[in-house]
Amino acid sequence: MSITNLKGLMRDVVLLSQTQTQMQTVVNMLPKILLVDDDDVFLEVIDRALNKAGFNSERSSASSLSEAYSLLAADTFDCILLDHKLDDGDAFTLLDKLAETENSPVVVILTNNDDVNIAVRAMKYGVVDFINKNKLDGQKLKEAIENGIEGRNRHRALEREKDALQRMSFYDELTGLANRHLLADRLTQAIKSAE
């Protein structure tokens, strides 16, 4: 093998390695979706509707709440598409668990029930959309997921900025030492607790 061929082969190996790294980065950027429904046929319907709408994502599925708990304990998800009624409970059982966790995923509830009271209760839990299974539209589902994830990401970014601003208001940026604002805040707290 000549040196020219060897250099060409080395270049190809480097390009292949870079391409694989770029592909892995794209895969890591795809939203991770957990589909929770006890009807396997409907899980396939959801999957096909999202594919038809051109929604690229990593998808996992669970046919029960207990299976969903296991998947949530083992991995993080950006969104959960959650059936309202399951064999081992309802959506609110899982929503109660998610309320206890930090950085919980966006939730979209899928149901055959058009009960407004259930929809209102779900929205109080922070559910981003409540979609009737009989009127399932892949594009609407895609938009609900994307808007929910985008809203959650904006909220998290604002929280980080708020925390950074609060830290900057209490600590000197250059030295990292507490400043007079922190001292005044702690003195006020100490006086209130002493009263």
Image (cartoon, helix red, strand yellow):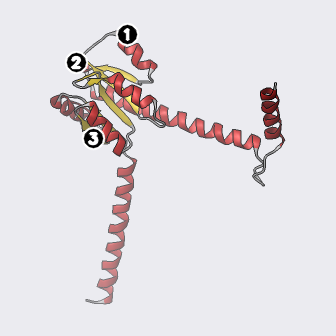
Q: State yes or no: discs 1 and 3 in contact (Cβ < 8 Å).
A: no
- Callout 3: few (<14), some (14-19), or many (20+) C-alpha neighbours within 10 Å? some
Looking at the rendered structure, the kind of residue marked 3 is Ser
Q: In the figure, residue 63 lies in which quadrant?
A: top left
Looking at the rendered structure, the kind of residue marked 1 is Asn
Position of 153 with respect to 94 (left or right) is right
Residue extending furthest toward the bottom: 2
Q: Earlier in the sequence, mark 2 or mark 3?
A: 3
Pinpoint residue 114: horizontal percent, then vertical percent: 30, 11
Pinpoint residue 21: horizontal percent, then vertical percent: 37, 61
According to the picture, the residue beneath numbered tag 2 turns out to be: 134
Q: Earlier in the sequence, mark 2 or mark 1?
A: 1
According to the picture, the residue beneath numbered tag 1 turns out to be: 117
Which of pointers 2 and 1 indicates the residue nearer the eye?
A: 1
Quadrant where the image shows the N terminus: bottom left
Q: Give the CA distance from mark 2 to mark 1.
A: 19 Å
- Callout 2: few (<14), some (14-19), or many (20+) C-alpha neighbours within 10 Å? few
Q: Secondary structure at mark 3?
A: strand
Q: State yes or no: discs 2 and 3 in contact (Cβ < 8 Å).
A: no
Pinpoint residue 173: horizontal percent, then vertical percent: 75, 50
According to the picture, the residue beneath numbered tag 3 turns out to be: 60
Q: Is residue 147 visible?
A: no
Looking at the rendered structure, the kind of residue marked 2 is Asn
